[in-house]
Image: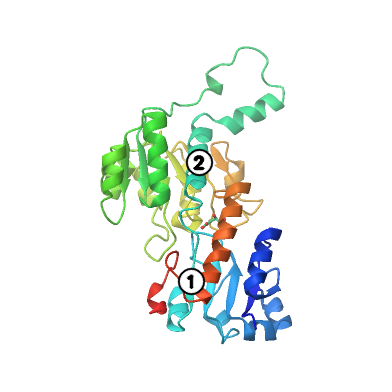
Amino acid sequence: MKPPVILYKKLPDDLLARLESHFSVTQLNNLSQETIKQNAQAFADAQGILGSSETVDKAFLEHTPNLRAASTISVGYDNFDVDALSARGIALMHTPTVLTETVADTMMTLVLATARRALEVAERVKKGEWQGSIGADWFGIDVHHKTLGILGMGRIGLALAQRAHFGFSMPILYNARRHHQEAEERFNARYCDLDTLLAESDFVCISLPLTDETYHLIGAEQLAKMKSSAILINAGRGPVVDEKALIQALVDGKIHAAGLDVFEQEPLPVDSPLLSLPNVVALPHIGSATHETRYNMAACAVDNLIAALSGKVKENCVNPQVLK
Ligand code: 8YV
């Protein structure tokens, strides 16, 4: 008999077929209380779950006594209670590497769009305001040769450093838990403390996961340390930035602009003050959202679940200690 698993995100047909060749798959739309109630037996039997973005905490795990592996179609796993999973011996699998380049492209998109005010001026063209040669009220600021600060030098931070260094001749500062030799040798990145990075960067780019340590890492105090001409970019997780403090800093002109792909609440509420600020570019969490990358992430997550449930895990496991 094939091991029973729950799929709670749509998969391309060929990947669904691959999953079904290994497992008996129950397809659901989400992991809401109602879904769990209506499919109690499927949850009770499930040895694996595959999906993304839904909360998997202690309360959820009470419904899944036979769970052995959880596979998320994402690199971030802040929606999982890793300690609770580990305590039960459940492997958590994620999809790093396959999305690295695409997320770094998204960050560079935010750097360029905010600096050159791309969305704002495109909107003015659509409104028919381009009537003669443009004046200084249409101008942006240069990106090339400006200092780019990176918070979090993981895979994505490194890919951003590569783009900034080779593509835009930008000096790079970074702050991370440890020195990153490759970033320093290949992209001339300079390690510095958070305050120095905030004070010296023209672009402060956040590429950090959400943890207890990074929650509201950037608040009023940190924003006040940035140059008034600086731009904040966040494509990590929304709650790393205190959004209220950010809005205040933008309104008060403490910083120049913000490019955001992630928010404290997603989807971003339509009445968020961020949406009425002209110097904010707000994207709908598209960091990894290209056809190619989302396919590769889903394929990776399917392979991860197959590996985890057959005891053959080599990589992509968040809590490998449970496999011993
Ligand atoms: C995901 C992300 O696509 O990988 C992550 O951590 O934030 C995105 O790339 C998102 O979680 C939806 O699956």
| Type of the residue with mark 2 | Asp
- Split into quadrants, the picture shows ligand 1 in the one at bottom right
Query: Is residue 150 placed above or below 36 in the rendered structure?
Result: above
Colour mode of the rendering: rainbow
Residue 124 in view (yes/no): yes
Residue wearing tag 2: 105
Q: Is mark 2 within 8 Å of ligand 1?
A: no
What's the residue at 52%, 22% (across, down)?
Answer: 139
What's the residue at 36%, 29% (across, down)?
Answer: 169
| Type of the residue with mark 1 | Leu
Query: Is residue 306 placed above or below 263 in the rendered structure?
Result: below
Q: Is residue 195 left or right of residue 3?
A: left
Q: Callout 1: 10 Å neighbours few (<14), some, many (20+)? A: many
Q: Can you give x and y, in whole percent of width and height, for residue 38 in the image?
A: 74, 81
Residue 290 in view (yes/no): no
Who is closer to the viewer here, 134 or 188?
A: 188
The local secondary structure at tag 1 comes to strand
Q: Is residue 149 left or right of residue 44?
A: left
What's the residue at 66%, 51% (across, down)?
Answer: 270
Q: Earlier in the sequence, mark 2 or mark 1?
A: 1
Q: Can you give x and y, in whole percent of width and height, for residue 95 in the image?
A: 50, 60
Residue wearing tag 1: 92
Query: Is residue 167 placed above or below 280 in the rendered structure?
Result: above
Q: Can you give x and y, in whole percent of width and height, for residue 28 in the image?
A: 70, 71
Q: Quadrant of the N terminus?
A: bottom right
The local secondary structure at tag 2 comes to helix
Q: Residue furthest right?
A: 38
